[in-house]
Image: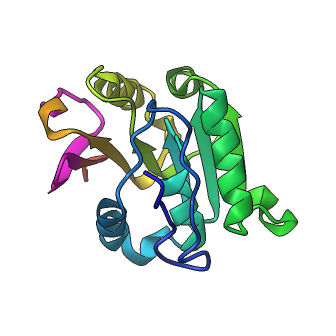
Amino acid sequence: MGNLRVIGGKARGRRLHSVPGDTTRPITDRTKESLFNIIGGDIAGASMLDLFAGTGSVGIEALSRGAAFVRFIDKAPEAVKTIRQNLISTGLATPEMSAQTEILRMDSFSIIERPPDRQFDYIYIAPPQYKEMWKRAMLILDKNSGWLSKDAWVIVQIHPKEYESIGLSNLSEFNQRKYGSTILVFFRTPDL
């Protein structure tokens, strides 16, 4: 996928580099545009945790649209290098923006299993396909929900064949959108 780009905000139209090889499955422009149409203006001033970040496309889109902070997590050295490269090429890696981004080369599960060091308004989960990793991440976040701010959303990007309902105690599914071979599943803390 050599035609990745930022589709909105101050870095709109800037091209994004792909992670070399076939270990990542970047989000399509159509799916990303739909995602940010759903989130809307709430992304401005929000914080996002981009797990299994790959190219960093979703977190970079959030920054371009005014997110206050994005933490990118990926354990692959090539992905981390690509995220840094994409932040530079989009103009989002300026000294002024340095406090707004954090890139960690770590296993996504090991991060969310830890005691939270901050809360996030959005957590985006787009793991490698067909390995049930999204379910594992959701179960961990459900138990360790201190990562979530009040009214936070957890958004999962998977292939429709991977979807199944999972029993959660602190989070509940509230929306689902299908775009070709991608489905976005939205979770939040139930209203009490």
Instruction: Please say which color scheme the image uses.
Output: rainbow
Asked whether residue 117 is in view, the answer is no
The residue located at (58%, 26%) in the rendering is 111
Compared to residue 17, the image places residue 115 above or below, namely above
Task: Determine if the magenta segment contains residue 171.
Answer: yes
Q: Quadrant of residue 151?
A: bottom left
Task: Determine if the magenta segment contains residue 168.
Answer: yes
Find residue 131 and report its horizontal and vertical position in percent.
30, 20
Q: How many labels does the image show?
A: 0
The residue located at (43%, 77%) in the rendering is 41
Find residue 8 and report its horizontal and vertical position in percent.
48, 77
Compared to residue 91, the image places residue 185 above or below, namely above
Task: Report the front residue among 99 and 74.
Answer: 74
Find residue 64 and report its horizontal and vertical position in percent.
58, 71
The residue located at (70%, 63%) in the rendering is 89
Image position of 82 (left or right of 169) = right
Task: Report the front residue among 135 and 30.
Answer: 30
Image position of 5 (left or right of 159) = right
Task: Report the front residue among 53 and 47.
Answer: 53
Asked whether residue 94 is in view, the answer is yes
Find residue 43 and report its horizontal and vertical position in percent.
48, 68
Q: Quadrant of residue 128?
A: top left
Task: Report the front residue among 162 and 22.
Answer: 22
Q: Look at the image and give the residue range highlighted in magenta.
A: 163-183
Image position of 142 (left or right of 11) = left
